[in-house]
Amino acid sequence: MQSIRVSNWFGSIVSAPRVVVEVETVEQIVEVMRDPERYPAPVRAVGSNHSTTPCGVAEGGTLLVMRKMDRILEIRDDTVTAQAGALYLDVNILLRKNGLQFYVNVELGNITIGSACTGGTKDASFAGEFGQLASYAVAIKMVTPSGELVEFTEDDPELLQVARSSYGLFGVVYEATFRVRRLDALSVHHEHFTFEQFAARLPELSARGESMMLYINPFTDSVTVEFRHYEPVGDPRTLTSWQWKLRNYVWSHAAPLFGHRVTTLVRSRRLRGLLYDLYNRFIVFALLTFVKGERTAAMAQQIRYPVVPTNARYTFSIWAFPEERYVECLRAYFAFTKEHYRRTGYRVDLLSVGYRINDDQSSLFSYSYNGTVITFDPVSTGSEGWDQFLRAYNQLCSDLGGVPLFNQTNFLTREQVDKAFGSRIEQFDAHRRRYDPGGRLLNDYFRELIASPGA
Ligand SMILES: Cc1cc2nc3c(=O)[nH]c(=O)nc-3n(C[C@H](O)[C@H](O)[C@H](O)COP(=O)(O)OP(=O)(O)OC[C@H]3O[C@@H](n4cnc5c(N)ncnc54)[C@H](O)[C@@H]3O)c2cc1C
């Protein structure tokens, strides 16, 4: 039988499933689950395939592409229900027309509902809110490997908690309901710090009660903080979007394109470094000067990335650290990136970022399960040396006691996963085996990182 070549959005994870099904109905998913001859294992569902790890890979098996199941089914006062393949941004656009919005507005508008309710995500938390999309999923409907339809709801919080971390390992999601909030005006501004200033002032900055997202540059020893909070919406027609459009253009297009050009065209390592730093200083200037406003639209933060990426694309990784130890960990990251550059000649060609995420036990693999965290995430055009950098970065972060995300932290080892999640891995796998005793949904990636030996 012939296989088909599939890659993730960035193009870094390539695989060859035997069968690819563009799913349009629940019945089709049931048919796939019930016919292992025609639809070999592993059976994996994907949404927009934006993940930077092989979490959605169905090598030699059956890949269910969910994008055609994209209907938005119901909007109520405080919830929205949509099919698994609907794009988060499309749902948000409709919510806004109804005076509503999602709680968490990740920058990636292309994330699908099916991935949002069962996988790892991040956006800087607002006071009293979570920073992970799945935490607001209140009902998740799946087709299990036996072809049964099951629903996880708040009536059984323990099961909902594991389902919110299930990554398609309990079943294929066909529909989910998210809790949503009233539309409000989003106030945003940025402040710039040297590393030492940031280190000294972090407790005070966190105590302001605003969301905090960081732009981090180890090579200029600096941290720029984006602060956001909500204000009453007043007249929604007066909300502005241009600040986010500018940010989105620079972040998702101009910066990666510049990084790509400099990385591929400039041969002198010293000149490359100077150009990266010059451009990064320009980005910080633009953030401080232009990306501010008292009444912006939260939804405008989301970017609709092109279906087929161009040279203006980027990739990244992520680990999270307890807030109280963040400065010590970030200091180690600064030292590590410089040492790695000296030793190997490789440095990331875009600004690193970081997110402050509130304490959250809503999902079993929440990376802020044990308390509020802040992340540091290298971002790159994926040039030569990136993979090697990531392996060293993983080791550093694991040694520092960090926690990764299965869909956004590539090249994890079982040892690192066990260290980060401890007994939660066995707890998850016990549930997984109940829904999928034959391992039909298990791919090599999750077999290595999560499954008990022999699965
Ligand atoms: C340019 C870029 C920017 C990004 N920005 C952000 C950001 O700001 N914040 C953030 O949190 N993340 C960000 N990400 C990461 C991204 O949000 C996650 O990787 C997310 O999982 C991608 O959603 P997707 O629909 O493409 O899922 P996929 O990559 O297709 O799938 C992710 C996982 O979910 C499973 N899955 C998908 N659909 C289903 C289903 N219907 N049923 C069961 N399982 C399913 C897959 O098997 C896989 O394990 C970004 C990624 C890129 C490339």
Image: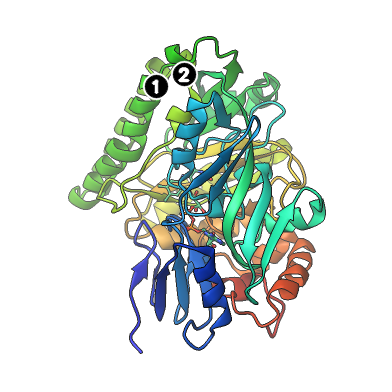
Q: Residue at x 81, y 53 (%)?
A: 156
Tell whether label 2 touches label 1 (CB within 8 Å).
yes
Are there few (<14), some (14-19), or many (20+) residues within 10 Å of tag 1?
some
Q: Name the quadrant of the N terminus.
A: bottom left
Label 1 SS: loop
Q: Position of residue 186 (x, y in %)?
A: 53, 19
Question: What's the residue type where badge 2 is placed?
Answer: Thr
Q: Is residue 142 visible?
A: yes
Badge 1 or badge 2: first in the primary sequence:
1
Answer with left or right where residue 175 lies relative to residue 67.
right
Whole-angstrom CA distance, mark 1 to mark 2, is: 6 Å
Using the image, tell me which numbered label, if any, was put on residue 177. Answer: none
**In the rendered image of this protein, does residue 318 appear above or below residue 354?**
below
Closer to us: 438 or 356: 438
Q: Residues within 10 Å of mark 2 (few under 14, many from 20)?
A: many
Splitting the image into 4 quarters, where does residue 81 fall? top right
Closest to the observer, 150 or 310: 150
Quadrant of the drawing holding the C terminus: bottom right
| 189 vs 299, nearest the viewer | 299
Q: Which residue is mark 1?
A: 241
Which amino acid does the dot numbered 1 rest on? Ser
Q: Position of residue 35 (x, y in %)?
A: 54, 83
Q: Give x and y (percent) for residue 438.
A: 66, 83
Q: Residue at x 37, y 63 (%)?
A: 12
Q: Which residue is mark 2?
A: 296
Determine the secondary structure under disc 2. Answer: strand
- Left/right placement of residue 405 relative to residue 305 reads right
Residue positioned 25% across, 50% down in the render: 310
Q: Percent position (x, y) of residue 369?
A: 75, 47
